[in-house]
Image (cartoon, rainbow, N blue to C red):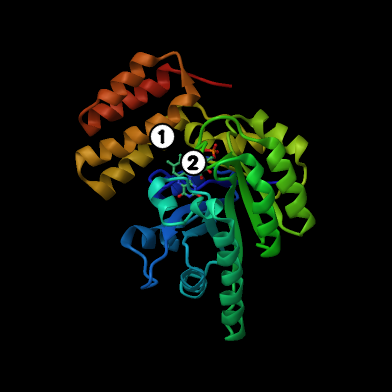
Amino acid sequence: MEIYFAPMEGMTSPLLRRNHAQCFGGCDKYYSPFISTNEAISMNNKELEDVDHEQNKGLTLIPQIISNSAYQSAMYIKLLSEKYGYDEVNINLGCPSGTVVSKGKGSGMLRDPEAMDAYLGGLQEELAKLSDEGVSIPKVSIKTRIGFYEPEEHIRITQILKSHPAYQVTVHPRTRKQMYGGEVNLDAFAHMYDELRSAGIGVVYNGDIKRPGDSEEILERFPDLDAVMIGRGLLADPSLARRIKGGEKASASEYAEYMEKILDGYIQKIGVENFILAKMKDLCNFMKPFFYGNDKGFKDMCKADTVETFRICMKQYIKNSNMIE
Ligand SMILES: Cc1cc2nc3c(=O)[nH]c(=O)nc-3n(C[C@H](O)[C@H](O)[C@H](O)COP(=O)(O)O)c2cc1C
């Protein structure tokens, strides 16, 4: 079974991905945060950097797109394959953000199953046309949720996914309404796992894997998963994938070295102190669940108003806190 690093807009930058792969490893694939399609079939600087192979040295990147247009999606898939050499592109049908949903993208598709059906059917047709023209089509995978409002919606969503089979589907078993909170629904996931697998579609589980035991439990119940995908758990414990594969938990010095490399990378890339601090403090909020017993150290780190004070507080915090098992 493989382990994938989930896409997280604003967090899983190429800088973080590269340092993660170098310092800890254990992830078979990393997903880019979503690239929003447009009529011009163009990418902005951030998106170009995200898919640049130089920026992703030492890791396998799968670019992710988000769209409500089958034609635009097919054109981005072609671009990512022909120009950038990617052999897999992931489609986001799960993002819960209000601005995304209001455009009928991401989990906005799940609110309107007919639109989702038309989008995936249209995409299949557009890709078939490109293939007839001699374009080599990469594998297309999907990342989705179990519903928009209610978990029962997963039945219809599964039917649609089966009628336009992707190569692989990652399921985060929450509804859009739940955002990233509340319980994951393993019964709905079980139905999707059985149905999608019976249609020859690979299945990936994503949600709340925070410790090696969490992935063991998932695997025990779903032994034929292609992979588990982990987001917040890997931001908190960057050694989690390595541990799941039988390796060591991060030591405090290893953790601090990794964080310093990210900090140095942002200093070089961003330059402006307040922006660097904001980026690092965002990351610290995600790392917090891995540590306990040093609330004061965490507050000091969050209060730091210069990069160098932050560096000292961060190192102190990591050194003087306990790490969860
Ligand atoms: C800040 C943030 C940004 C995210 N950005 C994306 C994204 O760009 N594309 C995507 O498919 N999912 C995105 N997600 C969802 C994660 O990939 C993942 O599905 C979610 O965090 C649940 O997995 P976890 O419990 O392992 O963190 C984001 C989540 C968070 C918290």
Q: Are marks 2 and 1 in contact (CB under 8 Å)?
A: yes
Residue 280 picture location, percent across and down: 33, 36
Where 58 sits versus 285, above or below? Answer: below
Q: Quadrant of residue 169?
A: bottom right
Image quarter of the C terminus: top right
Find disc 1 in the rendering and name its residue: 257
Residue 58 picture location, percent across and down: 51, 54
Residue 110 picture location, percent across and down: 55, 52
Find disc 2 in the rendering and name its residue: 23
Residue 266 appears left or right of 30 = left
Amino acid bearing label 1: Glu
Label 2 or label 1, whichever comes before in sequence order: 2
- Report whether residue 139 is seen: yes
User: Quick one: SS at disc 2?
Assistant: helix
Q: Quadrant of residue 256?
A: top left
Where 35 sits versus 76, above or below? Answer: above
User: Quick one: SS at disc 1?
Assistant: helix
Residue in front for this viewpoint, 285 or 141: 141
Where 325 sits versus 79, above or below? Answer: above
